[in-house]
Amino acid sequence: MKKIAVMGFLALSLAVQVSALDLGSALNTAAAVQGATKTPTIQSNELVTSLSSLGVTPTQAAGGSAALLSNARQKMELADYNKLLKDAPALDQVLDNGYATSTIASKTATTQEQFRVLGMDASMIAPFKGAILNYAKTKTSPALVDTLAAAMQ
């Protein structure tokens, strides 16, 4: 009788483990699909795509944009900055993207130093600002674009 009880318990345990494995696989697949539809790659980001015409890599495009936006954030009201990121999702994405955040050496570094870390010189700052402002003009109010332009000076 003991053997039958042990065998039954082992069979039940095995069935639970198999169903847990299937459920785990299903959850992993669902998470991957959800992540793929929720967060586009940095290469498909509108701003990064527009900056590719400058001959920069997606990493440089995201990193340079993040440097300028992070520095602008220090000069903007939080409500304005949050509205900008809500209205213009590509800006929020470059800030959240691993490419951008991992390449910026220090919060105290100047924009020129941040661009140098990314392998670009200071002459690239003005075209980056222009691209960011052009993108923002298509997504948010003129007043908010003006606020951003002033903060990036």
Image (cartoon, grey):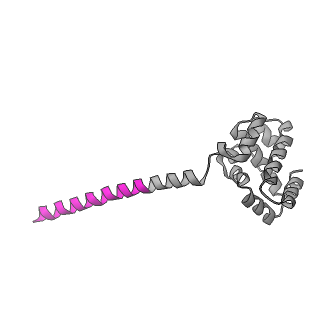
State the residue at coordinates (21%, 63%).
Answer: 9
Instruction: Estimate the x, y position of residue 7 in percent, counting from the top left.
Output: 17, 60
25 falls in the magenta region: yes
Q: Nearer the viewer, residue 43 or 115?
A: 43
Question: Quadrant where the N terminus lies?
Answer: bottom left
Q: Is residue 113 left or right of residue 102?
A: right
Q: Could you tell me if residue 5 is visible in this image?
A: yes
Q: Quadrant of residue 76?
A: bottom right
Q: Quadrant of residue 5?
A: bottom left
Task: Determine the residue located farthest toward the front in the rendered image.
Answer: 138
Instruction: Estimate the x, y position of residue 20 in percent, counting from the top left.
Output: 35, 58
**What residue span does the magenta drawing correspond to?**
1-26
Instruction: Estimate the x, y position of residue 31 in percent, counting from the top left.
Output: 50, 55
Task: Determine the residue located farthest toward the left in the rendered image.
Answer: 1
62 falls in the magenta region: no
Instruction: Estimate the x, y position of residue 22 in percent, counting from the top left.
Output: 36, 55
Q: Nearer the viewer, residue 88 or 8?
A: 88
Considering the whole magenta stretch, tell me its main secondary structure: helix
Q: Quadrant of residue 84?
A: bottom right
